[in-house]
Image (cartoon, rainbow, N blue to C red):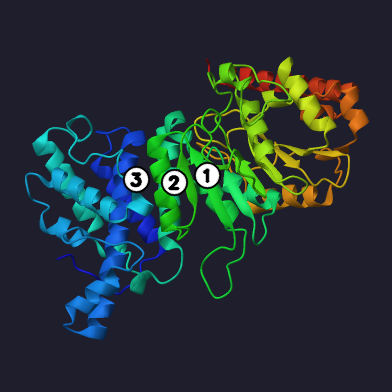
Amino acid sequence: MAETTQVKPSQDEINSALWAACDTFRGVVDPSEYKNYILVFMFLKYLSDVWKDKYEQLKKQHGKDEALIKRKMSRERFVLPDNCTFDYIVQHKNDPDIGGKINKILEKIEDENKSKLEGVFRNVDFNSDSNLGQTKDRNRRLKNLIEDFDKPKLNFRPSVIGTEDIIGNAYMYLIERFASDAGKKGGEFYTPHEVSELLARLVKPKAGDRICDPAGGSASLLITVAEQVPFKPNTHIRDCSLYGQESNGSTWALAKMNMFLHEMDAAHIEWGDTINNPRLIEGDHLMKFDIVVANPPFSLDKWGAEEATGDPYKRFLRGIPPKTKGDYAFILHMVETAVEKTGRVGVIVPHGVLFRGGIEKTIRENLVRENLLDAVIGLPANLFFGTGIPAAILIFNKGKKHKDVLFIDASKEFESGKKQNKLREPHIKKIVDTYKKLATIEKYSHKATLSEIIKQDFNLNIPRYVDTFEAETEIDIHSVQKNIDRLEKELTQIKGDIKSYLKELGI
């Protein structure tokens, strides 16, 4: 049986130990693939440690009354069948069929917890030749993985780590590291935490809100927004309802596990294409939300324009976006699902959304004339995994009390990094404070009237409204010439001195 310890590991220790466990797969499996093995195994270890902790507590209370203990355990948040714990896996780590055993354990856990975990493990195969190698290599790798998780620093028992969100934080840490290492393929499903934090503070969710991310990815953005909401009295449950949808099956599974690790079990995360197959439905219409946030795929090709004319939910009455650029398809869906008169929308977009012509210009004009657009915020380049292009945040507000649109150029304020640039707290705070106050700040922000936007023909390109031009320092030509003359005179003198010196040496 795996050894346990009562020494509480720190967040950094857990993060480091988890990242070190990835060495089992590095150089063998692509990061976009091995993330599934690591994150599923982490989730399995978490379920097992919580189960073990509760069992030992009941054992102390009820002694040998196994029937009573079993009844109480059957009412736990997650139920683990017999021989489905991490300790059982450790005992069998040398078995020749260990990959198959792990698959069966996951299948049993899923069956036992169908209402919560159905489908969560379907996209990972611990007995895969194609991903993990032939039997001998695969078994060695799985044994290494098991031993990496069988360490005191990866003790996830609540009695050891307490009530802090250490496990949820560790999961988010891993997802971000995977996105960074995997490049574009991995970065598609993750919004850097500081960008999520910024967006969450801009949309300002409150207690009782219904919050949705229709392009949910791994649910990290949705969780960050939820964390702005206070807990229900005397609980560790956020006072809000969470909803999301994700089209990629593997990423949907990550999102479900992410929610459980953050103890947001009531979240409704659906699997499917939001534009072509919206799953968050009430009766015959789209579900409505107080807050809608998303980082949709940039300029998605083949998003479903051919079906948009007959959309039963009438999302595209303001115009059908180009079939090769789905940005406005997501924007229109989000605006349509925001509660009338009060709903708020925050969406991350490429800058082309601000100025491209044709039908996109028509859609832009309609959104502005309806007084839905509240702010346009330009972000620094190279913030996102997989792309160096700068992005913008659009804030829509169905309860706007004024007619202006705030433009913020935050593109020049960031911390440089080797792989990614970062927004830090002072940068985030300045953006949020400027938005809250609708402040015009020289070379940073401008509150534009409708007439100004009309004058620009509904082009929302930020430099048209925020003048960041820095005049070059005037050059004093006479002073520069005097310096040149002086330097040439000094150079002539030095050449003469060198020539005299060489002559004395007979050279």
Packing grade of label 2 (10 A; few <14, some 14-19, many >=20) is many
Mark 2 vs mark 1, CA separation in Å: 9 Å
Location of residue 53 in the rendering, given as x and y in whole percent from the top left corner:
29, 72
Q: Amino acid at mark 2?
A: Ala
Residue at the outermost front position: 283
Pointer 2 residue: 255
What is the tally of numbered marks visible in this picture?
3
- The kind of secondary structure element at disc 2 is helix
Pointer 1 residue: 244
| Quarter-of-image position of residue 66 | bottom left
- The kind of secondary structure element at disc 1 is strand
Residue 120, label in figure:
3
Q: Are marks 2 and 1 in contact (CB under 8 Å)?
A: yes
Is residue 61 visible in the rendered image? The answer is yes
Residue ID at (54%, 35%): 278
Mark 3 vs mark 2, CA separation in Å: 9 Å
Q: Nearer the viewer, residue 263 or 467?
A: 263
Packing grade of label 1 (10 A; few <14, some 14-19, many >=20) is many
Please identify, in this view, whether the residue under mark 3 or under mark 2 is nearer the observer.
Answer: 3
- Asked if 485 appears above or below 147 in the picture, the reply is above
